[in-house]
Image (cartoon, rainbow, N blue to C red):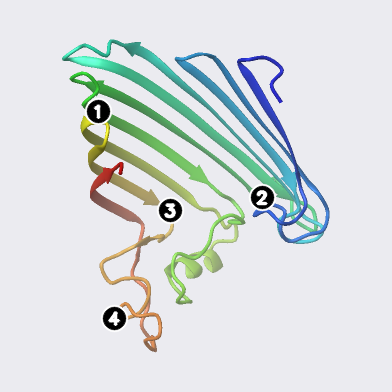
Amino acid sequence: MFPSKKFKTEVWLLNGWQTYNSWNKSIGVGNSNYWRPNENLQVVGNFYMGKDSRANTIRFHHDNSIVARYFKNSSSGKISQAAFSINTHYGFQNGGGITSKTNYMTGAAVSNRTWFNKNKLALTLRGDFVTNPGLYLAFTPSPVTPNDFTDAIVNDPKQKLNIYQATATFDMMPNDNVTFRFEYGYRQSNIPYFAGKGGTTSPDGWMDTPVNNWRPDLQKKENRFTVATNFRL
């Protein structure tokens, strides 16, 4: 629905065929809102409530974001454009012996992107975090169990997962059909969650290899440098 030409809202009824609300027959509800007052600003808010897992457990999820361009001079050989985004998430589950005080998630991400040389170069800096007490949205990072992640959960009665991340991304865009990307990323968690040099699948990397006493190599910190090229055909 479009209450105005600058505002769009969607109302969802989820009947079990979707990813959300897929485990129960009761109908889930949701709402998505987009406000774009001009070409430099977008505000988004999404909401969902339904039963994703246990029959007596209700989940609520909410995320919202602000994307704003605060500088534009496309013909400049120096800084030609700049924008930032702020995104936040909150959710919880409650019922069936579970309380929202101990089973929730919250997270946020802040990014700033600056374009240079008539929008042919760009640098994006981003920082984000997520915390998930109860771990109801987390999953083991390795199919081989037990591992350091599952051990930490057993030994931690509060069952909390905290992850922090920072990235720096440099893009080269000589034309509209190709982008060369160079990105450095750092991630850190309070319990082992990231794949180490020893791998997380099996001793030799194949799924059907007997693991015997082998344990996945899970780490609390990760440093990664990524190079990518994207083409538009």
Residue shown at 44%/48% (left/top)?
163
User: Which label belongs to residue 71?
Assistant: none
Q: Quadrant of residue 206?
A: bottom left
Image coordinates for residue 1, horizontal then vertical, percent: 71, 26
User: Which label belongs to residue 102?
Assistant: 2
- Tell me the kind of residue under disc 4: Asp
The mark closer to the camera, 4 or 2, is: 4
- Tell me the kind of residue under disc 2: Thr
Image coordinates for residue 33, horizontal then vertical, percent: 64, 27
Residue shown at 28%/10% (left/top)?
73
Taking 45 as reference, is 65 left or right? Answer: left
Cα distance between the residues tagged 2 and 1: 41 Å
Q: Earlier in the sequence, mark 4 or mark 2?
A: 2
Residue under circle 4? 204
Residue under circle 1? 122
Taking 163 as reference, is 82 left or right? Answer: left
Residue 94 or residue 26, whichever sits in front: 26
Cα distance between the residues tagged 3 and 4: 28 Å
Residue under circle 3? 190
Other-residue count near label 4 (Cα within 10 Å), few / some / many at <14 / 14–19 / ≥20: few
Asked if the residues shown at circle 3 and circle 2 are in contact, with their CB atoms under 8 angstroms apart, the answer is no
Q: Earlier in the sequence, mark 2 or mark 1?
A: 2
Residue 115 or residue 88, whichever sits in front: 115
Cα distance between the residues tagged 3 and 1: 32 Å
Asked if the residues shown at circle 3 and circle 1 are in contact, with their CB atoms under 8 angstroms apart, the answer is no
